[in-house]
Amino acid sequence: MTTGWAHPILSVEETKVLEARLFADDEAAEWRAMQLAGRAVAEAVLADFDEIGGIPEGSQILVLAGKGHNGGDALLAAQIILERYPKVRADVRLVYGMRGLRPLALRCWQQLQNNHACNVREIAEHGLLDAYDLCLDGIFGLQFRPPLDDRSSRLLQKINALPIKLRAAVDLPSGANEKDAFKADFTYATGVLKKPVLSWPNAGRLRYLDLGFFESGGAVGSRDSVLTDNVLEPLREWRDPHADKRSQGHLFVVAGSRNYPGAALMTVTAALRSGAGLVTAFVPESLVPVFAAQVPEAIWVGWPETPNGGLALEGRHLLLERMSRATALVLGPGLGREVETIALAADMVKSSPVPILIDADALQPDVIALATSPLVLTPHAGEYARIAGKRELKEFASSVPATVVLKGPVTRICGGKEIYHSLLGGPVLARGGSGDLLAGIVGAQLARTPDDGLAAVCRGVVWHGLAADALARKHGAVAVRTTQLLDFLPNALRM
C-alpha cells in the first residue's frame, strides 16, 4: 500500500522494476538520487552516533566501496561527514579497484578526493588499521548473487573481526545473510526498504531513508509497508480554534492493582501527554489519593478492590454509568490475573460501545472473543503466543477481527490485510513500562479519532518510537527511566 505515511516494502526484484521505471537509464536522475542517498545516510549515521555520545573528534572511518551505486552512496556519505567534521580521516577500500568503479561511483570517488585529499587515503586490504570509529559498507547492492567471492569473503571476515563503534550498511549488508556477510549495527535502506533485511540478523537495526521514490504512488504489488513520520501530520497542524476538551476525545482507562500500581499511572500520564482532551481513570480505590495528587489533570474514579488488590466485579456499575461519555477505552495495564478481575475485563469487553484497546494481563483469549466493538490488541511476543498460538499475524488479525500491534524490535501493525512496520524506538524501549506508555499514547489517538482506528494506532506507534529515538540520542539507551520518553513527545512533532 502507498499512502502519504506508509511506503511499500519491496522484494529485490520489485525494487529493480521500480528503479528502472523511475530512472530509465537517465544518468542525471540517478546522480540526483545518489546525492540524496549519500546525504541521507550521513545524516542518519551521525544522528544514531549520538546514542553513544556522538562521533568522536578526529575519528578514523573506513569506507568499503564496490562497483556501483551502493559504493557511490557510501563515498558521498563519507564526504558529508568530512565536511561536517574536518578532523575526521577516512580510509577508502575500493574493493574492485578504481577501474572497477562504474561511472557514477567513480565520480563520487573523484569528488571525495578532490574535496578532501588531505583526509582521505586509498588503502589495500593489508592497510587496514587496528580499529575504526565508523565503517560505511557499500560493497554490494541489489545485484549481489551468493555466494561471496573469496576476495570479498576474506575482507569481510577481517572487517567483522575489527573493533568498530558503528557498523553502517548502505541499503543492504554486503553479502546478504551469507556466513561471512557484513555484520551491521544499522542498515540504512535508501529509497526502498527491501523485504529480505527484515529477517536478516546481521542487518542490525533498520532505518528507512525516504528519498521520494513513492511520491507519485505506483507500488509494485506489495501489501507490507513501512511507516514514516508523515503519519504525525494531523498532530503537527493547528488545532481547531473552536475546539474544546470534549472534541479532543475522552479516553477511559481501566487499569492497575495494588501489585502493579505504576502501570496505570504511566498509561494515564502518557494519554494526557499525547493529546487526549479528557482522561477518566478507573483504578483501585486505595491508589486514588496518591495518583490524584501526582496527576490532577485526570478524572480518578476509585474502584472496589478484591482482597488481593485487584479490581472487583462489584464495581462494574462505575464504568457502565459513565460509559456514554467515552470515545475509547484502554483496558489491562497492571490489571493482574486474578480470576475475578479477568471476569470483569471480559464483561467490559462484551459491553463496551466504543473502540477498546486491550493490553497486558487483559490479553486473554476468552476476553478477546467477547468483543462487540472495534478492537486494538497490543501484545509483545509472549502475549501474542498466548492469544494467537502459532497463527501468522494476518491470519490472527483477520480472525478476531482486530488491529493487532505486535511489539518488538520491529513493531508490526495489522488490521487483517496490510502489515505496517515501524522501525522506530530501538533497544531503549527494552525496559518495563514501555508498553504502558504505548497503550496511553495509542489510546489517546484512538479517543481523538475513533472512526479512523488504524491510522490512529499507526500514529501512536510512530510517535512513541520517535520519542524513544530522541530520548536515546539525548541520554543514551542505558541510564534512563521509561517515563523520560514522554518529555520527548514534543520533539517528534517538530522534526
Image (cartoon, grey):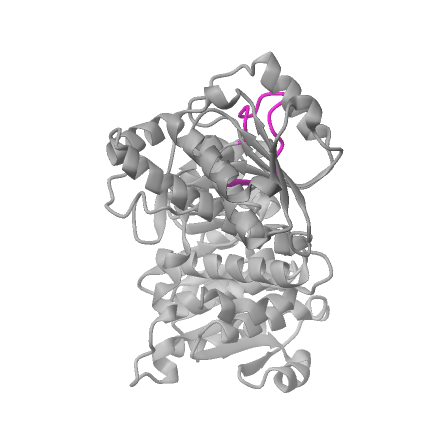
Q: How many marks?
A: 0
Give the answer, above or below, for where 265 lies relative to 292.
above
Residue 342 in sight from this viewpoint: no
Please identify the quadrant where the N terminus is shown.
Answer: top left
- Asked if the magenta segment contains residue 178, the reply would be yes
| Residue drawn at (46%, 28%) of the image | 141
Q: Quadrant of residue 183?
A: top right
Residue 232 in sight from this viewpoint: yes
How far across and how far down the image is residue 333, in percent? Answer: 59, 63
In the rendered structure, the answer to whether residue 279 lies left or right of residue 201 reads: left
Magenta stretch, main secondary structure, is loop
- Asked if the magenta segment contains residue 226, the reply would be no
Q: Give, as a single range, the part of the protein colored magenta.
A: 173-188
| Residue drawn at (38%, 27%) of the image | 103
How far across and how far down the image is residue 288, in percent? Answer: 64, 82
Please identify the quadrant where the C terminus is shown.
Answer: bottom left
- Pick out the residue farthest to the right: 130
Q: 155 or 473, which lies in front?
A: 155
Q: 357 or 130, which lies in front?
A: 130
Q: Quadrant of residue 62?
A: top right
Q: 457 or 324, which lies in front?
A: 457
| Residue drawn at (72%, 67%) of the image | 259
In the rendered structure, the answer to whether residue 418 lies left or right of residue 95 reads: left
| Residue drawn at (54%, 58%) of the image | 359
Q: 159 or 468, which lies in front?
A: 159
In the rendered structure, the answer to whether residue 207 lies left or right of residue 256 reads: left
How far across and how far down the image is residue 32, in percent? Answer: 33, 42
